[in-house]
Amino acid sequence: MNDTVPARKSIGLRRTLIWLYEGVGAWPVAFRWAVFIFDILTISYFLASPFLPHSGVHHWLDYTIGSVIALDLVARFYIAPTKRRFFMRFMNIADLIVVFSMLAPLISQNYAFLRVIRALRVARAFSILNERSPLAKYLRLHRAVIERAVNLVVFLFIMSALVYANQVRKPGSDIHNYLDAFYFTVTSLTTTGYGDVVLVGWSGRVLPIVIMLLGVTLFLRLLKELVTPSEKVDVECTKCGLHRHDRDSVHCRHCGNVIYIENEGFEP
């Protein structure tokens, strides 16, 4: 009899977590909104932290945020239907890197810049919100633009951190702080190249090449999506599971099932 008590408690905890993360009702929606707000605040902190002085409060804030993200990661792993595939997803690996960088700062301080990859969660926030909420609808309708904008911002901050880590202690380098690195990254991406900040060494030649090639590509993809939105949208067919359809589709092009594609004038 006593052996079944822990099992029942475990099942009850799992059902509660599934209800909070995936269920319907006031409490699950409030919980997912709290997760979304926490993500926005932490991402804002990650983007601003390179420009903030590193104090004792700063480190304790890192430990607190890292602990909360770790608890969220453990909870999602606990309720995952297939544990083997859980860490095959990029966002889960990103969260694991973030937790490591925040809870082990002395070991991982050189990889702290990877925290900004958590900003990619914003583009997928509609998946944790109420499907009928105005914000979720807006995110679904503008998913491609949001994802491209977030990818560009994340790229800027990661490359700025790489420039800073590579150049800050080199003799003759013009990079003295993170703002210098961010300024150099932006001017390189826009191909402005004022020449007032110069990198040194062979890596000082490779990094600008990467910034210009990849950065311009990301920027042009964002610009293209703003000017000429993609003719394809991500809408899953309830019958066969096909995701990609034309914006004006009425039937699934694979199985012929009726599909409903939201647009600015669509009201379910």
Image: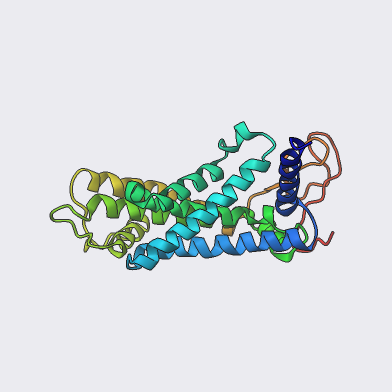
Residue 129, horizontal then vertical, whole percent: 70, 58
Q: Which residue is drawn at the image coordinates 32% and 61% (left, top)? A: 192
Apparent side of residue 190 relative to residue 20 in the rendered image (left or right) = left
Q: Which residue is drawn at the image coordinates 43% and 47% (left, top)? A: 100
Residue 53, picture quadrant: bottom left
Q: Which residue is drawn at the image coordinates 58% and 57% (left, top)? A: 122
Quadrant containing the C terminus in the rendered view: bottom right
Residue 254, picture quadrant: top right
Q: How many marks?
A: 0
Q: Is there any visible trace of residue 138 in the rendered image?
A: no
- Please identify the residue farthest to the left as the structure is shown: 171
- In this rendered view, identify the residue nearer to me: 52 or 167: 52
Quadrant containing the N terminus in the rendered view: top right
- Please identify the residue farthest to the front as the structure is shown: 2
Q: Is there any visible trace of residue 186 in the rendered image?
A: yes
Residue 105, horizontal then vertical, whole percent: 36, 52
Q: Which residue is drawn at the image coordinates 56% and 37% (left, top)? A: 87
Residue 183, horizontal then vertical, whole percent: 32, 63
- Please identify the residue farthest to the top as the structure is shown: 84
Residue 221, horizontal then vertical, whole percent: 51, 51
- In this rendered view, identify the residue nearer to me: 151 or 23: 23
Apparent side of residue 35 relative to residue 95 in the rendered image (left or right) = right
Q: How is the image coloured?
A: rainbow
Residue 68, picture quadrant: bottom right
